Image (tube, rainbow, N blue to C red):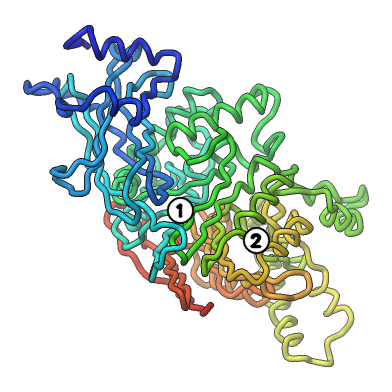
Amino acid sequence: MQRKTETRRAFLAKSIMASGGVILASQLTACEKLDDFFGDDEPNDGVPRFLHGVGSFDPIATAVIIWTRFTPTVDEVGSFIQINWQVATDKDFTHVVKEGLQYASATNDFTIVQDVTGLEPDGKYYYRFAQPELNQTSIVGETITLPTAGAPLDSLKLAFCSCSNFPTGLFNVYDAIANSDADVVLHLGDYIYEYEVGGYGTNENTTALGREHDPTTEILSLEDYRLRYRQYRTDEGLQLAHQKKPFIVVWDDHEITNDAYEDGAENHDDSEGDYQARLQRAIQVHSEYLPVRTDTQGVIYRNFEFGNLVNLVMLDTRIVGRDRQLGFTDFFNPDGSFDFDGFGAALFDPSRELMGEAQLAWTAGAVGGSNAKWQVLGQQVLMGTMTVPAELLILIGQVAAGDTSPETLGALQQSILELSTLKGRALAGDPTLTEAELARLAAQVPYNLDAWDGYAVERERLYSILKGKNTVVFAGDTHNAWHNILNDANGDKIGEEFACASVTSPGFEGIFGSDPATIQGIEQAFTLLIDGLQYFDAAQRGYVLTEFTPASATASYRFIDTIATASYTEVEGNTTTFAV
């Protein structure tokens, strides 16, 4: 690409090579005003350069991060490319309040991450980017700043979502979120998936929809992760959501690899190289495409104060402090029996951590130092106690492993029927229940050891921080929709938990099929058998829209009827309102 000058711009480009291609707005403002935001008057070369849209992240009272990516041609990949940016209070940009420039380069995959500071609190803003020498501009993004901490706030609407697997279908859920009246979107992880072409989530529509993963292999290298994010950011629904709403994000496991923890992952072995190196590559690319407002790369726990109404505490329950997950298969004896004593000792080992001491202490400070009406936790995995009779979990595991024989499915259906009947009798205080029948109900095991149930002692420590704080917990990860009452080990209520269905990733229907009667039976059985579980949807895709006021909170499950075509219908599912 030919440069217009070799003076000011060339000097700036050369001087930033050691700093990763970033010029802060405060540094630029004292030197130069962008009189030529759009650049040359002649037509551009016709090659689109802002193919991945725009986005904004981590708004606070006086600042917000804005994002885009410049798409270079082959001749430009070794260059530093000037990108101008502007923020205005109107969509026509007649009132520009901040502007500046950065240089995009291969160092950060040509992404631009600009923290725009010095904005007014509780404001609506518009932003855009331009490459002046090519006379190309991005679409216009919309964003906000938050009210000042402690300022009166009558209402706040937060949408949250998770688990978007590109091959499984179109991201219609993001489109629905873009068209909602949410103020801010929380993404609770699994924004991308690491699998190869034909891997998890691939279905009969993948090829026809042009949704096969790129690259074709499981992602391992820096370029692999970058290419995967680029692919996901071509989805029109996702682009629209980022254009219309500011996002606050945390990662879960698939931004790295399945069932990741601090020192390893289920979906990683020595043949794929050093795990810590892979983790750092994944974290780097995450910061390039989904920036967060923290001082240390790799640390994503942080909080946001929405006036005097909501203190939003975003946690990392995946990487920073997590011990390796327990596995049921580790506790079977040579004779095939299950070592319940050994399993229980491991499960309630007080040294096992999910968040880690540093994050737990930080959370205590963030919650304890807040005077907001609501304490809202945005995090990855189910927090509620989700234990089920062992015989039921064994049968579900057999089906999930691929055993869909009539005998196994029949045994599962019979177990569901019998256990549900026994639980109903127990709740009614039936004195005729036998010891054997009660034992079937009493032999409880956690449904999901990757969730908080696998780290029960630390959950109690967190509950002691949250008790009496008007707590609402958001979760993702499972691809299914859940509403739990959170109770501590003493039976005291800590708060309410709402977990969203996935954007596309398959839920229980991926295991049991889509027969409505089968799905309904599973939903009813889980809701009856799991104490504290108020609502369960096992087969729909969607998000949760919440509203907080000084008097109450409302959570509404929103579902879309298809991910196979761009034309969809949004329907409202279960809605819960509860008072302070």
Q: Label 1: few (<14), some or many (≥20) within 10 Å?
A: many
Q: Is residue 394 visible?
A: no
- Say which residue appears at 61% left-offset and 69% top-offset: 469
Which residue position holds label 1? 186
Amino acid at pointer 2: Met
- Label total for image: 2
- Say which residue appears at 88% left-offset and 53% top-offset: 336
Q: Residue 86: x and y, percent? A: 24, 36
Q: In this rendering, is residue 331 above or below 223? A: below
Q: Label 2: few (<14), some or many (≥20) within 10 Å?
A: many
- Who comes first in sequence, dot 1 or dot 2? 1
Amino acid at pointer 1: Leu
Tell me the element at label 1.
strand
Q: In the image as oriented, which residue stretches furthest toward the top?
A: 6
Q: Are marks 1 and 2 in contact (CB under 8 Å)?
A: no
| Residue 128 vs residue 148, the one in the foreground | 148
Tell me the element at label 2.
loop
Q: Is residue 127 visible?
A: yes
Q: Is residue 52 left or right of residue 57?
A: left
Which residue position holds label 2? 383
Q: Is residue 75 left or right of residue 399?
A: left
Q: Is residue 64 left or right of residue 137?
A: right
Q: In this rendering, is residue 358 above or below 558? A: above
Image quadrant assignment for residue 206: top left
- Say which residue appears at 67% left-offset and 54% top-offset: 451
Q: Is residue 533 left or right of residue 179?
A: right
- Say which residue appears at 65% left-offset and 56% top-offset: 399
Q: Residue 132: x and y, percent? A: 18, 23
Image quadrant assignment for residue 340: bottom right
**CA separation in Å, label 1 and label 2:** 17 Å
